[in-house]
Amino acid sequence: MLLRVRVTLPDRPGTLGQVARTLGVSGADIVQVVVLERLGGRAVDDFTVVWPGAARVERLLAGLAAIPGVRVDGVWRAIGAPTTTGQDAELLAQVAANPADGLATLVDAVPGLLAAEWAVAAVVPVDWASRTGGGGATVGHASWRTPVPPRLPEVTPLRGRSMTMPDGGHFAVAPFGRAGLVLVVSREHSETLAPAAFHATEVDRLAQLVRASAVILGDRLDLVGAPPVSANP
C-alpha cells in the first residue's frame, strides 16, 4: 500500500539521507519526496512510500525516531498516485471542459491531490452567523469515500484554514466565495495510522483550486443545494 510519511528534520547535509536510508531498511520503497517547508534550520518533508501490507508501521516509526533531531508528524494511507507537476492545471481544465459536472469533478479529485480520504462541498446556511456554534452545513456533493452521513466540522464561509478534531482527525476547508459553499477535505485518524495535519502549503493549494473553480463555474455554484423547482401542474 502507499503511505504518506511526514517528517520534520534538521535542514543540514546528511539528515535527509539518514531518513531515506532508515525508510529503506524498514522496508519502505520511496516513490516521491516533497519539501513542504524550510524555515529556521528545520525542514518539513512528505515521503510517499510503498509499504509492505503485512509489515508493522511501528518498526518504521521506531527507526525514524532514533535519528537525532527527527520528528515524525504523521503516517497515513495515501489515496491514488503521488502528486506530479501539472495535476492542478489538468484538473481545472477538466472542470472548464465540463462545467455541468465541474463541482463533482473537483470534489472527487481533491482527496487524491492532498493525500486525504474524502471531500465534500458543504453548503453553509445564509444565517450561519446567528446560529449557535456557527454550523449547520449540509452536503452539496461528496466524494465516493465519504461516510454517510459525513462528520463535518463547524465550518463558516470566510477563509481557508486547517482544523484538528479531538479524536485526531484533520480537516482543510476553503470557501468558494459564493452561495455559502465551502470545500471540506478530511484525513481521519485510525487505530494503526495517525495522519499529519494539513500544512499551510496544502491549505493554500486547496484555496487556489477552489478560487479558480469558482471563477470557471460562476453562477452554476448558486444552484448547489438549492431546492428543486416544481413544474406547474
Image (cartoon, rainbow, N blue to C red):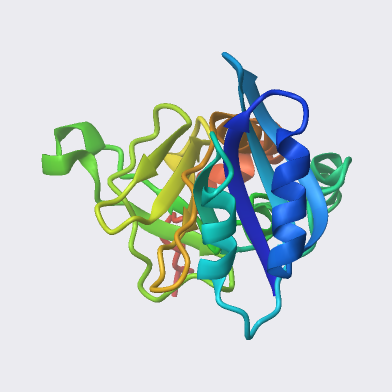
The residue at the point 46 percent across, 41 percent down is 173
Q: Horizontal and vertical percent for residue 187? A: 48, 57
The residue at the point 73 percent across, 70 percent down is 27
Vertical arrangement, residue 50 with respect to residue 221, above or below: below
The residue furthest top is 40
Q: Describe residue 144's horizontal placement relative to residue 125 as left or right.
A: right
The residue at the point 11 percent across, 41 percent down is 132
Q: Describe residue 124's horizontal placement relative to residue 80 as left or right.
A: left
Q: Nearer the viewer, residue 28 or 92?
A: 28
The residue furthest left is 132
- Quadrant of the drawing holding the C terminus: bottom left
Q: Describe residue 126's horizontal placement relative to residue 171 as left or right.
A: left
- Total numbered labels: 0
Quadrant for residue 127, please give it: top left
Q: Describe residue 156's horizontal placement relative to residue 224 as left or right.
A: left
Q: Horizontal and vertical percent for residue 24? A: 77, 61
Q: Nearer the viewer, residue 61 or 157?
A: 61
Q: Horizontal and vertical percent for residue 48? A: 73, 56
Vertical arrangement, residue 158 with respect to residue 176, above or below: above
**Residue 207 seen anywhere in this rendered image of the structure:** no
Vertical arrangement, residue 76 with respect to residue 220, above or below: below
- Quadrant of the drawing holding the N terminus: bottom right
Quadrant for residue 13, please give it: top right
